[in-house]
Amino acid sequence: MTNLSSAPRTQTPRMRPRFGWFSDRWIAVSFLTPTMLLLLFMTVFPLIWSLYLSFTEWSVARNTREAPVWVGTQNYVDLLTNERTWERFVVTGQFVVPAVVIELVLGFAVAMLLNRKFAGRGALMTGLLIPMMLSPVVVALFWRFMMQGDGVLNYYIEAVLGVPPVQWLTGRSVALWSLVLVDVWMWTPFMMLISLAGLSAVPKYLYEAAAVYRASAWFRFRHITLPMVTPLLLIAIIFRMMDAYKLFDQAFVLFGLGGGPGRSAQTAALYIYQVAFDQFNTGEGSALGYIMLVVIIALANIFIRVLNQAKTGQ
Amino acid sequence: MLRRILFWLALALVIFYFAFPLYWIVISSFKTIADVTRATPAMLPFVDFQQTLANYSSILLGTNIESETGVQAAASLGEFRERLLNSVIISGISTALAVGMGTLAAYAFSRFRIPGEGDLLFFILSTRMLPPVVVLIPIFLFFSNLGLRDSYLGLIILYTSANVPFVVWMMKGFFDEIPLEYEEAAMVDGYSRIEAVWKIVIPEAIPAMAATAVFSAIVAWNEFVLSNLLNRNYASTVPPYLNSIVGVGQVEWGRLAAAAVLFVIPIIVFTFLVRNHLLRGVTFGAVRR
């Protein structure tokens, strides 16, 4: 309970308050309406519209004058029976899973490293968090600069390691990993931040008790640290997976819509953009967008179920 | 002793990995055209290369850059200033609108009993989880028909609606932490609820609103896809502009670096200002400690 006397002091009140005729009900309605209307207009309405468009054959560039032609589920059938659609989702998975796993491991490791007192810790923390606040476009542009054939990365790889240069942006098998590298640079700080929050919340007495029983470092980590931090980490993983799944900017800047050599780095988001705004197949693009939406909802649901199981299991 | 050495060694590696790209951007922005693409990378100003402010003056003042191959035209880089101004106006106004609207809605969610409150809040959150590509097509059509493409208003509306869910969730968390007794005491003293909100609750929430505003502003400031797709020229912001310079012919990395540094400085300042709220900010208020 809060002590009433701690409330900020108010000026001498008037006998008849202004705006007294505004009932709470009225206030609730008028406070909520602008936000709800905006979101209704900018998300629900477009969602319905694109659902309709996904059942039509139409192009915003070629046949603007004509009405969209209803084709039923044709777009979905075409897309789902086309191998190339599946390839795009596989490529997306091949990017998302390694990126999130590396970010998790590296972020957690850095958090363990920083979870102690040393001089300059605060400044260092703030500095390490800068990458995720930067514009993805700027980040990707500069990695592109560094990853060029004769760029600074290759120079040091050759000069210091004596290994032949890596074709970061043009090698078929490397391109997607370059994207992972950029994403890891940008988003490991996010994992670190959340891990650190988890670590600092583990009660000290647990470790003290473990010390009394001379538990090994591995035992302390496995049976105290990890279980205490896991719930937070799962939240972090969900956030990162969702964002990585719809990632567009970095991939676009590094490889363009085509997704690099032989489409090896063309993720689903790039592909939709290409279909909808480069080839201007509006109907097909909408259908693809919906497929992407259904996939993410399904994945998120599975993941949340796992999360709840993990929570109740402990 | 060994442990301490290992600790500092590991720390040095981590710092190197995260700091090197930033260091590289900054020094590139001070290099001449010849130095920036030199085969042997020049690492240290004063030692490896002669630093110059030419890139910055070229971008900000539109002056020409001299080089061994003759005078390089200042091209259209005067555009950078216009783009920067657009970015400031659009992210500024959209942030103010999002924070204003979202704070009111958050107050209502925090203090009143609203039918279907949980569902409404989830709906608000889900709009942010949506892959933007899905709503992009209708918005593109819709903006084309209404003449909102390439206009300040169009982007402001979009960025406001992109940030409002975040503001609602963040501010609801903050309001939940302000004791109900504050307003009740004021209302017992004879204030109406509107007055209590305006004179008691909002002043209490100002620091939280400021932190929320900073996060929203960074999102709008960094946004690329919408601005790239919907703008041709007039209302275009910095990120699509930076990307477009790379697309054309030989890239002038020096000037690009200078532009990127200027564009990024406000974000670094802002990050520093909200460093204590970062955890909350990046998790939609889900994690509070």
Image (tube, helix red, strand yellow):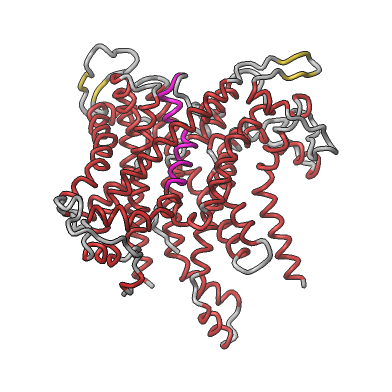
Q: Quadrant of the C terminus of chain B?
A: bottom left
Q: Nearer the viewer, residue A305 or B59?
A: B59
Q: Nearer the viewer, residue B39 or A285?
A: B39
Q: Nearer the viewer, residue A262 or A113?
A: A113
The residue at the point 28 percent across, 65 percent down is B180
Q: As displayed, is residue A134 above or below residue A51?
A: below
The residue at the point 79 percent across, 15 percent down is B69
Image x and y of residue B2, in percent: 76, 70
Q: As displayed, is residue B150 above or below residue B117?
A: above
Is residue A101 visible to the viewer in this orientation of the structure?
Answer: no
Image x and y of residue B125, in percent: 32, 48
> Residues in magenta?
B213-232
Image x and y of residue B94, in percent: 39, 36
The residue at the point 37 percent across, 36 percent down is B132
- Tell whether position B287 is magenta: no
- Tell whether position B224 is magenta: yes
Q: Quadrant of the N terminus of chain B?
A: bottom right
B111 vs A306, left or right, is left
Q: Quadrant of residue A56?
A: top left
Image x and y of residue B253, in percent: 67, 28
Is residue A86 visible to the viewer in this orientation of the structure?
Answer: yes
